[in-house]
Amino acid sequence: MSTPRADTHALADPAMAALHDATTPTDADLAALHARLESRADADLDVVYRTVDSPVGPLLLAATDAGLVRVAFAVEDHDAVLQTLADRVGPRILRAPGRLDAAAREVEEYFAGRRHSFDLPLDLRLSAGFRRLVQEHLPHIGFGSTASYAQVAVAVGNPGAVRAVGTACATNPLPVVVPCHRVLRSDGSLGGYVGGLDAKRTLLTLETAA
């Protein structure tokens, strides 16, 4: 898909005008201009994104000023995910890998077995109500541990909402970081997973082996 780009209006910027008039701009001039234009462009954006490689395939990471808003597996169709973000968050979306360096680093540390929990700010605006309540509980299921859908329903105060817990896990906008893969059926079988059962199995195996 084609994603919108922030218009920096560079020639209208006083720094650009000064640079345009200068016969021999210095490295400091150029650095200051780049920082100013980058800051202006960032201020105009609703969502920034990048992809990272992982043992479960390429992951799309997307963030707003509030925090990480979306993690998507390749099977989810990244173009469709970005279009949904444009519709629900805002149309000004830009691929900006540097803005997501911290998130990419924590994801890579997780898959390398060096990180057992994430310390990233999260933007949970894509979930609401009971689904959000469930998703906020999921990080309390520790690394290498699992819980059943029924146990999660009890933990969030609604023992009869087992199916709704399953729906909350299936619609989790931040898989891996918000660990819905740790929720299993009561008989120990995997249940469903947004990234596919092979991905869920890989994540669980990674955690038990770490």
Image (cartoon, rainbow, N blue to C red):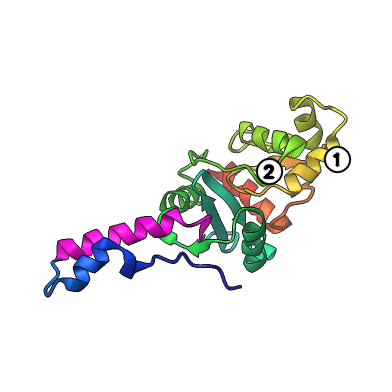
Quadrant occupied by the N terminus: bottom right
> Relative to the observer, which residue lies in front, 30 or 11?
11
Examine the image and state in which quarter residue 21 appears.
Answer: bottom left
> Relative to the observer, which residue lies in front, 151 or 69?
69
In the displayed structure, 112 sits above or below 115; it is below
Judged left or right of residue 190, residue 199 is: left
Rendering coords of residue 101 (x, y %): 41, 53
Give the residue at x 35% y 60%: 38
Give the residue at x 23% y 59%: 32
Query: Which of marks 1 and 2 precedes in the sequence?
Result: 1
Measured in 3D between alpha carbons, the distance from the residue under mark 2 to the one under mark 1, in whole angstroms, is 14 Å
Q: In terms of secondary structure, where does tag 1 sit? A: helix
In the displayed structure, 99 sits above or below 6; it is above
Residue bearing the label numbered 1: 163
Label 1 crowd (10 A; few <14 / some 14-19 / many >=20): few
Rendering coords of residue 157 (x, y %): 78, 24
> Relative to the observer, which residue lies in front, 171 or 20?
20
Label 2 crowd (10 A; few <14 / some 14-19 / many >=20): many
Judged left or right of residue 93, residue 138 is: right
Q: Is residue 18 magenta?
A: no
Judged left or right of residue 122, residue 181 is: right
Q: Which residues are magenta?
A: 27-50
Magenta segment, prevailing SS (helix, strand or loop):
helix
Give the residue at x 69% y 57%: 195
In the displayed structure, 142 sits above or below 50; it is above
> Which amino acid is tagged 1?
Arg
Can residue 119 be seen?
yes
Residue bearing the label numbered 2: 180
Give the residue at x 42% y 49%: 102
Q: Is residue 49 magenta?
A: yes
In the displayed structure, 55 sits above or below 25; it is above
